[in-house]
Image (spheres, rainbow, N blue to C red):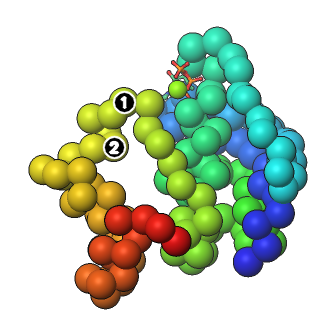
């Protein structure tokens, strides 16, 4: 997968209750850019970010991470490239130890325990 851009093409998203949160969002972020997304409470920042790794999928339009369109089928590939830190730490940290929390992702990817340990302890 090329990691060289994130692209939103005419992305619309409505929540199941009918709230229209995204209405035709278009942008491209290229490799090496650092981008801040600013806006009023409820304007759709979190909804937009949840589309970058397929936690939400567009009602209309397309999200691309590199050359991969974000769809149900590509989720495993996309999620290896796009991480997410949640606004509320209670949504993010839920294991009894820091080790287990960091290991949760690699274990979920069914990596061997030796590799999990290597990744958790860091150093390349
Ligand atoms: N689960 C949901 N069900 C229905 N509507 C929702 C849901 N989550 C968010 N919304 C609505 O979608 C719109 C966008 O919300 P979103 O959380 O993306 O905004 P935000 O810019 O991240 O806000 P904040 O600055 O408060 O974090 C708002 O009108 C919000 O009320
Ligand atoms: Mg938010």
Q: Is residue 78 visible?
A: yes
Judged left or right of residue 124, residue 24 is right
Q: Residue at x 55, y 28 (%)?
A: 19
Q: Residues within 10 Å of mark 1 (few under 14, many from 20)?
A: few
Judged left or right of residue 79, residue 70 is right
Q: Residues within 10 Å of mark 2 (few under 14, many from 20)?
A: few
Q: Position of residue 58 (x, y in %)?
A: 64, 51
Mark 2 CB within 8 Å of ligand 2: no
The residue that mark 2 highlights is: 92
Q: Residue at x 27, y 44 (%)?
A: 93
Judged left or right of residue 33, residue 55 is left
The residue that mark 1 highlights is: 88
Q: Is residue 37 above or below residue 78?
A: above
Q: Position of residue 38 (x, y in %)?
A: 71, 21
> Residues at badges 1 and 2 in contact (C-beta under 8 Å)?
yes
Q: Is residue 9 visible?
A: no
Q: Secondary structure at mark 2?
A: loop
Q: Position of residue 61 (x, y in %)?
A: 77, 53
User: Quarter of the image containing the N terminus?
Assistant: bottom right
Question: How far is disc 1 from disc 2 in space, using C-alphas?
Answer: 7 Å
Specify the farthest residue to the front: 123
């Amino acid at each position: 997968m090329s990691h060289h851009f994130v692209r939103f093409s005419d992305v619309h998203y409505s929540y199941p209750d009918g709230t229209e949160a995204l209405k035709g969002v278009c942008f491209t972020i290229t490799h090496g850019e650092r981008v801040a997304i600013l806006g009023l409470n409820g304007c759709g920042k979190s909804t937009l970010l949840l589309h970058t790794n397929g936690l939400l999928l567009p009602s209309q339009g397309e999200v691309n991470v590199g050359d991969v369109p974000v769809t149900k089928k590509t989720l495993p590939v996309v999620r290896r490239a796009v991480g997410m830190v949640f606004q509320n730490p209670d949504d993010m940290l839920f294991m009894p130890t820091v080790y287990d929390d960091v290991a949760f992702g690699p274990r979920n990817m069914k990596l061997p325990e030796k590799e999990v340990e290597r990744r958790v302890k860091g150093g390349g």
